[in-house]
Amino acid sequence: MKKSIFSLFLILVASIAFAQVAPQPLFKPEIKKVLFLGNSITYAGNYVNDIEAYCIAHFPNQKIEFINVGLPSETVSGLSEDGHADGRFPRPDLHERLSRVLAKTKPDLVFASYGMNDGIYLPLDLVRFQKFKDGIQWLHDKVVASGAKIIHLTPPIYDEVKGKKIGYADVLDVYSNWLIEQAKKEKWEVIDVHYPMQRILDAHRRLDQRLGIETSFALANDGIHPAEAGHWIMAKSILMHLGAKEIIKAGTIQATLTNIENPDAFIKLITERQNILKDAWLTNIGHSRPEMNKGLPLEEAQSKAEALEVQIREMAK
């Protein structure tokens, strides 16, 4: 009897210890499809790939379909500057395709990243700002009406040193601040990626100045499109918001994949798979932007993706 009680005690202690250390999945069990909406930064997809890599590595039993339908040049404001793309075409407008996106992908959760293109690289103007706010409100309402949940991302930073559009960094500060306010006023879920990027850029620039180094550090060499380090700051901000607090000191996605034997090969496979699928989804859904890759037929792309998925899951065992 005493032995049985002692055994039960050990089981209870072990269960409590496991509960304290076992990581909790970042997404609720009912989340099966996660959609990423945005412009060229989302289409590039590095931050999307990082998020998927982390989730597969740490929660291999939770099967989630991560769908990237970011479209380069797109706005949610419906605005486009004169001579965009050297006059070849105006900026695509999310209003033209959102209904099709939601109907075809049927997401449970949507991450939306807009703002970078919405001020069309000009100083702050209240009319343009209102167009951005109206577009975001419309997007929010459409996603909620579809039955999905939406999480807004503040826009990434614009680097005036590299991009040369003076005053545009302030525009994205204003757009970011408004989104952050909606989290308080309207109870929206908003993840700030803007100011984490800004803090890291500023810290590096101060160090360059202190050491007398000519300004060389940048998260985006053209001022707009972040390289891998910038995408990781975005992904890290999202993952930490969702609950992955332990990655606070991780400088790269690879640093979080300690249970994967070859993290670089793991991420390469996820990237290859996402590249096939995002072009297929964009072609299947349809859009108004010319000069895009023509994706494979969706079923063919999904078949190729499934073959890569087997390899990815094998590496995550």
Image (cartoon, grey):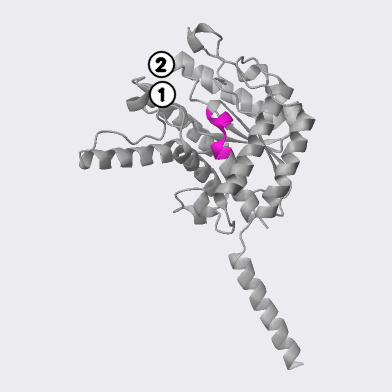
Residue 138, labelled with which disc? none
Q: Which residue, given by chain and number where applicable, does mark 1 sit on? A: 171
Q: Which residues are magenta?
A: 41-48
Q: Is residue 28 visible?
A: no
Residue type at tag 2:
Leu
Q: Quadrant of residue 314?
A: bottom right
Q: Is residue 40 visible?
A: yes
Proximity of marks 1 and 2: CB atoms separated by less than 8 Å:
yes
Q: Which residue, given by chain and number where applicable, does mark 2 sit on? A: 122
Pick the residue in front: 23 or 281: 281
Q: Is residue 275 magenta?
A: no
Could you tell me residue 22's position as x and y percent?
A: 62, 63
Q: Residues within 10 Å of mark 1 (few under 14, many from 20)?
A: many
Could you tell me residue 30's position as x and y percent?
A: 74, 46
* Point 55% across, 10% down: residue: 90
Mark 1 and mark 2: Cα distance apart in space: 8 Å
Q: Tell me which secondary structure the magenta stretch mostly adopts.
A: helix
Pick the residue in front: 35 or 292: 292
